[in-house]
Image (spheres, coloured by chain):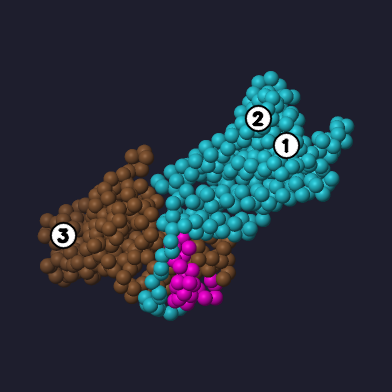
Amino acid sequence: MTSLANTAVLPQPRRGLPSLAPLVTLARRRLQLTARTPRELVVPLLTPVMFALVIAPALKQALHTDGHYESYVALGTVGLLIPLNTMFAGLGVIVDREHGAQRELLAAPVPRALLVLGNLLVALAVTGLQLAVLIGAALARGIHFSASTAGVVWFVAAALLFAIGMYGVAETLANRVPKQEEYIARVPAIAILPWFLAGSLFPIDALPSGLDWFAKVLPLTHGLALMRYGLLDDSSGLHAIWRMHSTTTMAALSLAVVAAFATVLTAVSIRVFTRSAVR
Amino acid sequence: MNAIEVTKLGKTYPGGVQAVRGIDFEVAPGEVFGLLGPNGAGKSTTVGMLTTTIRPTSGTARLAGVDVTKHPLAARRVSSVVFQDSVVDRALTGRRNLEIHARLWSVEPRDAADTIGGLVDALGLAELVDRPVAGYSGGERRRLEIARALVSQPRLLFLDEPTVGLDPRIRYELLDVIAGLRARSDMTILLTTHYLDEAERLCDRIAIIHAGKIVALDTPAALLAALGHEILELRVSGDVPTALKALRARGVAGDDTFAVGSTLTVPLHDRGGSDALAAVEELGLATTAVGTRKPTLDDVYLRLTGGRLAEAA
């Protein structure tokens, strides 16, 4: 080891212009950490892929339904994949806080909201990748989708906004509970239970009275109805929620619900993080 | 302009715990300033307030003239921290950890590469820096964290108990590294520790903090001088207060005498050591050991913190 006096002659750093650079840096860091944690990439994908490729065809055969049901369930599994993936991404926040460099990042001269947004960008990228794998696997399995360009836009918008909202839920929870164990214990109630009620496997009309009203306020119900409208040209989910004549109006209303969910939960997650970061 | 200005700074946590009770101090540019105190004295809370991760409940703090509460981003821009615990991305390489710091502190990439190269060599990290940090030893991680804090060439460096939990060899290595930082005359260092030798070796001035208050602030030499030139130390086998009373009545012990367990430490000031020993013998005090020695910073510290160092160590 040589003397640190050498550092006295190091060049004085020039400060770059303020820009999106800190956000890119934080997102790249999170992506590198995620890439080194295969659990975050693979585990959330297992159950939805199994549902889409194994359970849906099995149900179709056992219940003597048509091919449309396979497509219906395949898109329904998107409603499982997004919450599972975003909740797994939330685990990274706890690891960062307990064993990682979160305090170093809190001492950095960047707005602390960027830490949340950097994590969000990576959660969205990973979710997008997983959705592509799921849809690709479903297509390879012979499951049929009937999507127009506009339909793909509806699908992407619904999936994106729902994923943003769910990441907000994950980030908020991660900053509210002290330990990973407590966080994991809450995942089934947040990521799986609503999935059964949101029209994933059957239309919400089939739910017992009262529960259908609960289903209608779930952002996931709106998200799934939009995704099916987009990729299957099936507006039955939207009709079950809104009971209106104009499909476009219903789709716009459901998109507004999912957008409000995304906006509110992102704001809440940033507020919870910044408040918990400063004692 | 002072590098650090702290005025009546206080922190009361929810629940009413007063961690810091209205402290005042100033640190000049280029100075190495020590905050010395036992566990729970308020050192880390003070550093937390200065680095904007803890919100003060009273008073003000300025870094290079910037109010840390009103302008936290500007305050963080001029400072770096080495935390008490290891705070690194273990899955990433050492170099990546350094680069992330450089990017977040807006160091131009070309300058960052040069600075990182220099620091990696200076801190003996060249063979490690491209490996994941998970494989580093505790001392190597600490060296990496010091290098990281220096990448942005901060005007202010906070070292929060940087050697705690390290084995003696690594600790002395790190002390050497930190002493080397003094060569950079433009950087101000605030070091917290409960190791007295560290403070004495590294710091220009020391503030001793106890129960959230600064109980002494001066140069190590001046703090030592306050105890006089010699110390009488007795291990009493009988009742300590009785022995202390007898020594006071005889004029050997003054108000600054203190006890830790059964050991009485008596600053002698103007009285000679042989006189004091003779007085102890004449008094017939029941002791298991008695002797004189030069005062140390431990004596200063124990007198001011009521012997709490023994509990902290």
Tell me the colour chain A is drawn in. cyan
**Residue A91 visible in this rendered orientation of the protein:** no
Q: Give the x, y percent position of residue B53.
A: 39, 51
Question: On the image, numbered disc 2 is attached to which residue?
Answer: A250
Q: Amino acid at mark 1?
A: Arg
For this orientation, the residue located farthest to the top is A209
Q: What residue is shown at x 50% (from left), y 62% (from top)? A: B100
Q: Is residue B185 magenta?
A: no
Gap between marks 3 and 2 measured at Cα: 89 Å
Question: On the image, numbered disc 3 is attached to which residue?
Answer: B253
Q: Which residues are magenta?
A: B101-129
Q: What residue is shown at x 58% (from left), y 61% (from top)? A: B91
Tell me the colour chain B is drawn in. brown
Q: Is residue A130 left or right of residue B83?
A: right
Q: Which of disc 1 and disc 2 is earlier in sequence?
A: 1
Badges 3 and 2: C-beta atoms under 8 Å apart? no
Q: Is residue A275 above or below residue B190?
A: above
Badges 2 and 1: C-beta atoms under 8 Å apart? no
Q: Which label sits in the foreground, 2 or 1?
A: 2
Q: In terms of depth relative to the viewer, which is nearer, A12 or B172?
A: A12
- Chain of the residue where label 2 is placed in the rendered structure: A
- Mark 2 closeness class: few <14, some 14–19, many ≥20 residues within 10 Å: many
Q: What residue is shown at x 18% (from left), y 58% (from top)? A: B256
Q: Is residue B116 magenta?
A: yes
| Mark 2 and mark 1 on one chain | yes
Q: Quadrant of the N terminus of chain A?
A: bottom left
Question: On the image, numbered disc 1 is attached to which residue?
Answer: A228
Element on which disc 2 rests: helix
Element on which disc 3 rests: loop
Q: Is residue B267 left or right of residue A104?
A: left
Q: Is residue A137 above or below residue B183?
A: above
